[in-house]
Image (tube, rainbow, N blue to C red):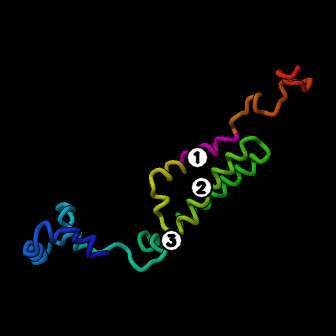
Amino acid sequence: MLHTTTNSGLHEFVGERALARCARSGVRAVDLGAGPGAVVTRHTKPTVNGVESRFGTLVVEMGIGGLTLWLVMSFSIIVAAWGVVKKLKGSPWFPIAFMIFWYAFPLLLPMTFNGIQPYEDFVLNAFLWLLLGILFRLPTITISEQFAGVNPYPNNRRMWMR
């Protein structure tokens, strides 16, 4: 698989002699379409290897302080969001609040343990912060009479029932 993806038909296109000339000059087949920066960055130190989770990568990249700040931020958000969910229990906003909490919790902790890619996804991250803003605003939103559970028909008869 690696041979197929790195050469990708280059033998047929350029020929064996040109490929050998590129190999002698230090240009790899994967660098041909990567631009001039690829040759410079090829000799840099590779990214972090040897850690199995994103938490380990956080420690290697930013130190124990970065991991501590990430965990403090995540737990603070989760605890504050759960407090809002408990405050809204019994109101019509409870299902929305619980679903926003249930979106934020796995994204910040279990998914981040497997890798930071879900958090770094622009769409998921934008939705996280937008929905958290909505969640913390929910307790102050008043419910209109129509949805507050007030019966608009006091004699318990519907308009269409005669």
Work out which residue is located at the far right of the displayed protein and give it: 155
Q: Where are the magenta residues, as a range?
A: 129-139
Q: Earlier in the sequence, mark 2 or mark 1?
A: 2
Q: Earlier in the sequence, mark 1 or mark 3?
A: 3
How far separated are the C-alphas under marks 1 and 3?
25 Å
- Quarter of the picture holding the N terminus: bottom left
Pointer 1 residue = 131
How far separated are the C-alphas under marks 2 and 3?
18 Å
Which sits in the foreground, 155 or 10?
10
Q: Is residue 120 left or right of residue 134?
A: left
Residue type marked 2: Ala
Query: Which marked residue is nearer to the observer: mark 1 or mark 3?
Result: 1
Asked which secondary structure carries label 3, the reply is: helix
| Residue 159 included in the magenta stretch of the image | no
Residue at the image point whose x is 80% and y is 45% from the top: 90
Give the overall secondary structure of the magenta segment.
helix
Pointer 2 residue = 104
Asked which secondary structure carries label 1, the reply is: helix
Where's residue 68, x and y in %? 54, 68
Residue type marked 1: Leu
